[in-house]
Image (tube, rainbow, N blue to C red):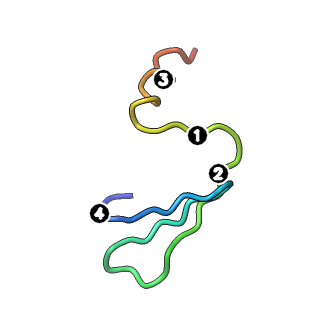
Amino acid sequence: MLGTAKATFKTGEAVVTMVAKDAPKKLKCDGSTFDNEQAAEVFRCSD
């Protein structure tokens, strides 16, 4: 996703609203999720 967005996080999902888009998009969060700072460490430890 590129552009300006606003996200609302709930248990099991994130609702993302993009600027200049009419409808928000729901993303299911099944399993582990990481923020951008944590992701760098995950990538380094992955084989």
Secondary structure of residue under mark 4? loop
**Callouts 2 and 4 close, C-beta under 8 Å:** no
- Please rate how many residues cluster around mark 2, counting C-alpha atoms within 10 Å: few if below 14, some from 14 to 19, many from 20: few
Secondary structure of residue under mark 2? loop
Rendered residue at 45%/62% (across/down): 7
Q: Quadrant of residue 12?
A: bottom right
Q: Which residue is mark 3?
A: 43
Q: Which mark is residue 29?
A: 2
Left or right: 3, with 21 as reference point: left
Q: Position of residue 21 (x, y in %)?
A: 39, 80
Rendered residue at 70%/47% (across/down): 30
Quadrant where the image shows the N terminus: bottom left
Up/down of 31 relative to 20, above or below: above
Secondary structure of residue under mark 3? helix
Q: CA distance from mark 4 to mark 3?
A: 24 Å
**Callouts 1 and 2 close, C-beta under 8 Å:** yes
Query: Disc 3 residue type?
Result: Phe
Query: Disc 1 residue type?
Result: Thr
Q: Earlier in the sequence, mark 4 or mark 3?
A: 4
Q: CA distance from mark 4 to mark 1?
A: 21 Å
Q: Position of residue 27 (x, y in %)?
A: 59, 60
